[in-house]
Image (cartoon, rainbow, N blue to C red):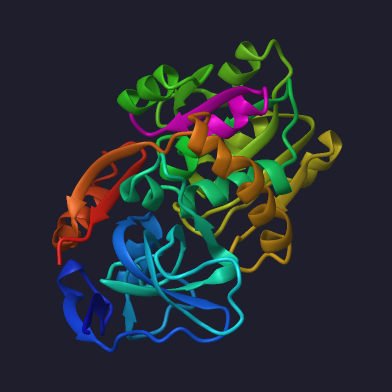
Amino acid sequence: MKAYGWNVAEFGGPETMQWCEMPLPVPGRGQLRVRVHASGINFAETRMRAGTYSGQELPFVMGMESAGVVEAVGEGVKDFAVGDRVFGRARGSHATHVLFDALHTLPLPDSLDFVQGAAIPVGWLTAWHALVTVGRARTGERVLIEAIASSVGSAALQIAKWQGCWVAGTASRDDKCARSRASGADAAYNYKTAQLAEEIMRDTAGHGIDVGLMTIGEETAASLFDSMAYEGRIVMYGSTGGRQVCFNLNIGTRNLQLLAMSISTSARFVPETMRSFREVAVPGFANGTFKAVIDKTLPMSALVEAHAMVDSRTHYGKIVLVNDF
């Protein structure tokens, strides 16, 4: 049996991604080999390909998440067996086969297809960790989601509404703001044109934001800080607009909490986030409480086109690749 994947041997543009034959992965202890049926696209992957993603080494196979069928299990794996339908985070997912860590693998409900499963892991687990584990959003609180049209943002909207929160979002385009309102957001603001702090204070009757999900960076940091309520929590979960952010220490007078996070390195992720996601969120997808937002489905062979769509930032939610090899 042969395996193939989208390999990157040197950093650069989309042309550096090449569909190549590779050794069939052999699961080690605590691992599963999964035949990939669908895999999700993430903004971070364009940075990995370009060489601007911290810590990314060459060569590597593209992809961060997928859904498929278990083909082989390694020593020590007890919760999964050959033939199981699964989904989860797994580096190298833009391929015919990929290794999953059993601790990061979830059973795919019968009511979901592989495309829906592939659209969940990175965005939804990031949003769940931010709002449930780190941000501790509570009923009645006001939540602001930066980049609400992203896969993380569109997931966070559903999670925050499920938590009983008033939810607002920001986006760089009016059509994305309109779509987020149609999807349940109580308010949405174009951060390119809005006077964000003024409009937030107006729409929250002067209270401000209790939990702010921050990902854009320097361009919007000041307006986000100014929008926060006393005792507010800012959860910094990404850096799509750059890693450097400056702020005035007068945030101390409002007792703001700055909470940084990464699901890849958090000691709380597996014991808290994965556990609660498996127990609460996965059944929620099965019964229709939650639904991954999928903008477009493309064949795996169209990865270059998918990267162009991500770079243009015109999509809403997730782009998913279906394995056609």
Tell which of 56 and 216 is nearer to you. Answer: 56
Percent coordinates x, y for residue 324 in the rendering: 15, 61
Residue numbers of the magenta segment: 157-173
Q: Which image quadrant: the C terminus?
A: bottom left
Residue 191 seen in render: no
Quick check: 223 above or below 107? Answer: above
Left/right placement of residue 303 relative to residue 135 reads left
Residue at x 31% of width, y 74% of height = 97
Query: Could you say which quadrant of the image residue 7 lies in?
Result: bottom left
Left/right placement of residue 45 relative to residue 96 reads right
Left/right placement of residue 189 relative to residue 60 reads right
Residue at x 52% of width, y 40% of height = 220
Quick check: 220 above or below 40? Answer: above
**Numbered label tally:** 0
The magenta stretch spans residue 208: no
Query: Could you say which quadrant of the image residue 111 lies in?
Result: top left
Percent coordinates x, y for residue 311 in the rendering: 26, 52
Query: Could you say which quadrant of the image residue 145 lies in?
Result: top right
Quick check: 77 above or below 246? Answer: below
Percent coordinates x, y for residue 317 in the rendering: 36, 39
The magenta stretch spans residue 167: yes
Residue 244 seen in render: yes
Q: Which image quadrant: the N terminus?
A: bottom left
Tell which of 69 and 299 is nearer to you. Answer: 69
Percent coordinates x, y for residue 253 in the rendering: 85, 36
Tell which of 189 and 58 is nearer to you. Answer: 58
Residue at x 36% of width, y 23% of height = 179
